[in-house]
Amino acid sequence: MSWLTLPTSALARLRRAGQPLAMGLYLGEERLHLVQFEAVGSALHLRAAASLAYPSPRGEWLGRPRRWRGWLRSALAEHRFAGRRVVTCLPANEMRLFPVHCALAPGQSADAAITQALRERLQGELASSVVDYLPIRNDDDATDHCDALVAVAPRAAVMAHLQLLEAAGLDPVALEVGPSALARLVALVNVADVREPHPHVLVVNFGRQSSHVSVVWGRRLVLDREIDFAEAALVQRVASVLELGPDMARRLLATKGLGGGAEAPPARADGEMAQTLAEVLRPEMALLLAEINKTLVYTASRSRGRGIDQIYLLGSVAQYEGVDRLLQQQLKVPVQVLDPLRPFPGALGAAARAPLAVLAGMAVAAGLALREAPRHA
């Protein structure tokens, strides 16, 4: 799903070995995330990756074009990014993503039915919006209805985003939807993690104020929705029950986790604290499990009873030690924290990759950077 593709003569040169692909760039609320790959033979290598904190609040910093441009140029040079070409996406709060179900009249194409449904739903909003949709192929082979995943954003927000990048001296070649970029990354990671030829995968993207679940079938994103679960609620719960400040509660979750270490039995004090935290957060985790189970049921209903083959976690809560094992015990589905850089060899060593692997924004940036990757890489 891509709102905008801007052709450029550089595209013809991307298939040569050793040529850098366009950078994946994601402007998060607190940090700028960047990833770039290069083709080496038939493989993709990680050329550069960085997650950079804004020097001041995002709105203030991005509103100062000269300083923004100078800061970004220095960062790109320091981290060995090449060229000016970028694939990007709008921040989640500037777009909407929703499913559409359409009945097909005799002789009516799916595209025509979806277009008609969008005109009826968006009405006057349509003229001032940029709209794209991804048809969803159902496993029931129905001919009387069709489904699509629709992305809508204000035209003014799209143009402002592109102008911001151009003001920094960058050349935007495509504007995508963040969950679609995640689906591209997940499809590649699945090659190593799942033995199915076209696996059904659920991705839970934890945020500080909200979270999302996405479902990917093979290479295709078929569902993305916001759920009522966020890191802030977990921190507030721990702070209230244990009578701690929010910062201390967040540090406790980050250092003790929800189940102890994975490689060896935890020290007694750490193990007891991890169990205490898991017990304190039981109501919140039950809400998360309910949302995941709801998605599992929906997926099975749309795919002739076939279930989810793999669950990936990313974002803030995914950093808590033991959360993957805690969920797997309840769901009986393989659960794994998604490391977006793991499949790719490259110049960055383990020490440089480790702090980047747990950031949800890096997964989106990696998916964006994979847009130009050859399918066989």
Image: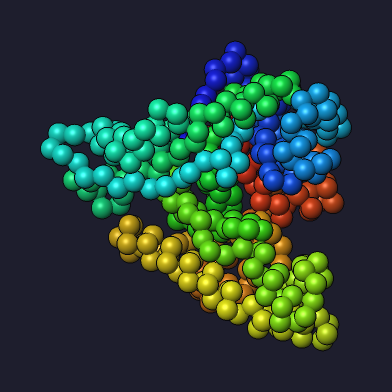
Location of residue 7 with respect to 128 vertically, above or below: above
Q: From the viewer's side, name the closer residue of 350 and 179.
A: 179
Q: Measured from the top left, where is residue 267 in percent x and y?
A: 83, 82
Q: Is residue 15 visible?
A: no
Q: How many marks?
A: 0
**Along the horizontal axis of the image, is 247 left or right of 88?**
right
Location of residue 345 with respect to 207 vertically, above or below: above
Q: Measured from the top left, where is residue 66 in percent x and y?
A: 81, 23
Find residue 169 and report its image quarter: top right
**Along the horizontal axis of the image, is 95 left or right of 137?**
right
Find residue 204 and report its image quarter: bottom right
Location of residue 11 with respect to 139 vertically, above or below: above
- Location of the C terminus (image quadrant): top right
Residue drawn at 56 percent across, 32 percent down: 157
Residue drawn at 71 percent across, 55 percent down: 358
Q: From the viewer's side, name the closer residue of 282 and 266.
A: 282
Q: Measured from the top left, where is residue 174 in percent x and y?
A: 56, 27
**Along the horizontal axis of the image, is 90 left or right of 141?**
right
Residue drawn at 59 percent across, 36 percent down: 89
